[in-house]
């Protein structure tokens, strides 16, 4: 009985000991397997690092994307009426506050459509400067139009922490320098308005540089008007190729630009050996301004600028972009006060020398004159239907001749109202009164001809007695962010495009391999909703895809005529297939 009663305990002890030994063996095997796995991981990581040195820039989160859309930033970067020559600072500030994420490309777009009615007391003479004042487009004493004033498409690429690329394309037949009417093909061209590479990280140091085609840092040249630019911008708002270096702090800002010589794209001209050939960096501009904090919701901006070679250096008769004998410098002083919902601004710019072309030998009683432009404006912000509403008034003046000369001056008064239906959609209305007619081309004469097609020396198209009134309605609509989840356009697709363009190896859990984009098949994980606005982001990504794979341009026709769904295991395509609601 004793033996029988002890037997189960002995058996249990033996089983426990056997079990302990087996666990010890399993732990040892597990340690060996872990060691082998770690060695394999280390080897694989080393191989990937050798093959793709930039692998560390691969997106770390599933939500990370290469293509991004920020409608408020897009509206600001494309808006020609605010921060006209300070877009580099705008980009740097948005990178600093986290609005622009690194290793991403932001796509922006805007369309400005207008309708207006204009009347003048002089036939064919309308001084309104938001369209070039030519008799080719404005005939008689009453004109009207409903048209696209401009369309813009921009790209801002954040490459790492301190490099940013920016480009903006512009379609603006109303203000194009092409010949003929607004419908002439020469005036209906798309141009690269700005394109530059920006170097700087204000989070680390307050210095920045940029290289390319950009606005000249001269003056303020902004306006409180919702649409119509100030005559100061029309007279001195420069655009040129060059190199910019700047210092940006919370208060003090200093910007200097080395400008390509010759007659540049707009408002700058420095002769190169008596020609307008842009063969030297012999022009420059400097701007210094400081922002003072006067209290809560109160700031004061004051600044001054110098431009070595303004556009006002040509001899008689004056035509755009012609060569000069010598440069004509200009200076500018400006201020902007913001108190709560009120904004007050003023600016004064003048050339230091006389403009030779303002002297017409056929009308010797009017001597050559310097060029002056100034403005003063106020804006009040309130709200309507819980959306911002801006009410503004501005007076600006352009002077180019002595008292009594037909080209003496041109005054502009603008009363405006702008309602932001969305943060990037601006509905506006303006009344504009223009006194005087002084177009820069042949401003002092040289274009009026007689019946024999010979120039009448003592006649000019300028007219200081001309008066015109403009009633204008319009909308400036920047791309609005489609309300589509990231998964709708496929996180994998965004990450894949980023990997290919930046040369980054795919993550280990990614089913995609890095190979040329043209061999990729984009599998859309979810169909787009039937709401048309939600397809906007997808269409933009499709456009970028086509641009980056030029051999697919033939697929555009197919995309425009038929959309089909992607099969589960499709063959390699020759175009990008989308599934978009037919309710659009």
Image (cartoon, grey):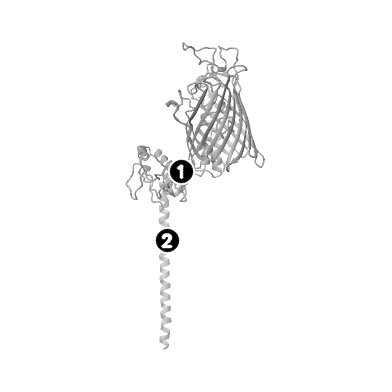
Disc 2 and disc 1 in contact, CB within 8 angstroms: no
Q: Earlier in the sequence, mark 2 or mark 1?
A: 2
Numbered disc total: 2
Q: Nearer the viewer, residue 562 or 552?
A: 562
Q: Which mark is residue 34?
A: 2
Q: Which residue is mark 1?
A: 533
Q: Quadrant of the C terminus?
A: top left
Counting from the top left corner in percent of width and height, residue 21 is at 41, 72
* Disc 2 to disc 1, C-alpha distance: 52 Å
Counting from the top left corner in percent of width and height, residue 69 is at 48, 43
Helix, strand or loop at label 1? It is: helix
- Name the quadrant containing residue 346: top right
Residue at the image point whose x is 40% and y is 86% from the top: 4
Q: Residues within 10 Å of mark 2 (few under 14, many from 20)?
A: few
- Name the quadrant containing residue 398: top right
Q: Quadrant of the N terminus?
A: bottom left
Question: Is there any visible trace of residue 255 in the rendered image?
Answer: yes
Q: Residues within 10 Å of mark 1 (few under 14, many from 20)?
A: some
Q: Nearer the viewer, residue 525 or 45?
A: 525
Helix, strand or loop at label 2? It is: helix
- Outermost residue to the top: 452
Judge from the rendering whether residue 568 lies leftward or rightward of residue 316; answer left or right.
left
Q: Which mark is residue 575?
A: none
Counting from the top left corner in percent of width and height, residue 6 is at 43, 84
- Outermost residue to the right: 294
Question: Is there any visible trace of residue 213 in the rendered image?
Answer: no
- Outermost residue to the left: 571
Q: Nearer the viewer, mark 2 or mark 1?
A: 1
Counting from the top left corner in percent of width and height, residue 475 is at 52, 35
Judge from the rendering whether residue 210 lies leftward or rightward of residue 555; answer left or right.
right
Judge from the rendering whether residue 109 lies leftward or rightward of residue 386; answer left or right.
left
Q: Nearer the viewer, residue 411 or 515?
A: 411
């Amino acid at each position: 009985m004793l033996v029988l009663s002890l037997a189960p305990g002995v058996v249990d002890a033996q089983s426990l000991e056997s079990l302990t030994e087996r666990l010890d063996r399993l732990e040892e095997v597990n340690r060996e397997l872990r060691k082998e796995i770690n060695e394999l991981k280390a080897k694989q990581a080393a191989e990937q690092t050798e093959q793709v040195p930039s692998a560390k820039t691969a997106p770390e989160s599933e939500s990370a994307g290469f293509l991004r859309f920020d409608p408020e930033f897009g509206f600001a970067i494309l808006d020609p009426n605010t921060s006209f020559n300070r877009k580099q600072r705008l980009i740097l500030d948005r990178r600093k506050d986290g609005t622009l994420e690194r290793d991403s490309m932001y796509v922006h777009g805007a369309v400005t459509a207008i309708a207006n009615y204009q009347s003048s007391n002089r036939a064919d003479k309308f001084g309104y400067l938001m369209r070039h004042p030519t008799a080719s487009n404005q005939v008689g004493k009453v004109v009207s139009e409903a048209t696209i004033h401009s369309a813009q498409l921009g790209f801002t690429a954040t490459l790492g922490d301190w490099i940013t690329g920016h480009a903006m394309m512009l379609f603006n037949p109303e203000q194009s320098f092409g010949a003929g009417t607004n419908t002439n093909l020469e005036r209906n061209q798309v141009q690269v308005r700005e394109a530059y590479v920006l170097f700087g990280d204000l989070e680390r140091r307050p210095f920045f540089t940029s290289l390319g085609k950009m606005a000249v840092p001269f003056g303020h040249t902004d306006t409180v008007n919702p649409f119509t630019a100030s005559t100061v911008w029309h007279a001195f708002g420069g655009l040129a190729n060059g190199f910019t270096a700047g210092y940006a702090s919370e208060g003090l800002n200093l910007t200097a630009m080395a400008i390509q010589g010759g007659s540049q794209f707009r408002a700058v001209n420095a002769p190169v050996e008596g020609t307008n050939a842009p063969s030297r960096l012999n022009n420059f501009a400097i701007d210094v301004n400081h922002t003072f904090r006067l209290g809560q919701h109160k700031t004061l901006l004051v600044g001054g600028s110098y431009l070595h070679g303004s556009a006002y250096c040509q001899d008689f008769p004056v035509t755009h972009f012609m060569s000069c004998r010598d440069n004509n410098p200009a200076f500018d002083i400006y201020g902007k006060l913001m108190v709560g919902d009120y904004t007050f601004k003023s600016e004064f710019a003048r050339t230091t020398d006389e403009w030779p072309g303002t002297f017409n030998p056929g009308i010797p009683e009017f001597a050559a004159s310097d060029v002056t432009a100034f403005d003063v404006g106020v804006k009040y912000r309130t709200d309507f239907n819980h959306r911002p509403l801006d009410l503004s008034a501005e007076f600006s003046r352009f002077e180019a001749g002595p008292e009594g000369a037909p080209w003496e001056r041109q005054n502009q008064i603008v009363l405006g109202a702008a309602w932001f239906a969305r943060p990037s959609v601006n509905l506006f209305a303006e009344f504009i009164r223009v006194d005087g007619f002084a177009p820069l081309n042949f401003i002092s004469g040289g274009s009026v001809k007689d019946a024999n097609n010979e120039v009448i020396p003592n006649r000019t198209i300028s007219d200081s007695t001309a008066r015109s009134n403009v009633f204008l309605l319009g909308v400036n609509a920047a791309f609005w962010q489609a309300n589509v989840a990231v998964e709708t356009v496929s996180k994998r697709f965004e990450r894949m495009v980023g990997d290919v363009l930046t040369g980054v190896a795919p993550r280990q859990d990614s089913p995609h391999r890095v190979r040329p984009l043209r061999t990729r098949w984009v599998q859309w994980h979810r169909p787009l909703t039937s709401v048309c606005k939600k397809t906007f982001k997808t269409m933009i990504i499709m456009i970028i895809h086509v641009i980056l794979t030029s051999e697919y341009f033939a697929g555009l026709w197919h995309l425009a005529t038929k959309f089909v769904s992607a099969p589960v295991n499709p063959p390699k395509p020759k175009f990008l297939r989308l599934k978009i609601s037919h309710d659009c």
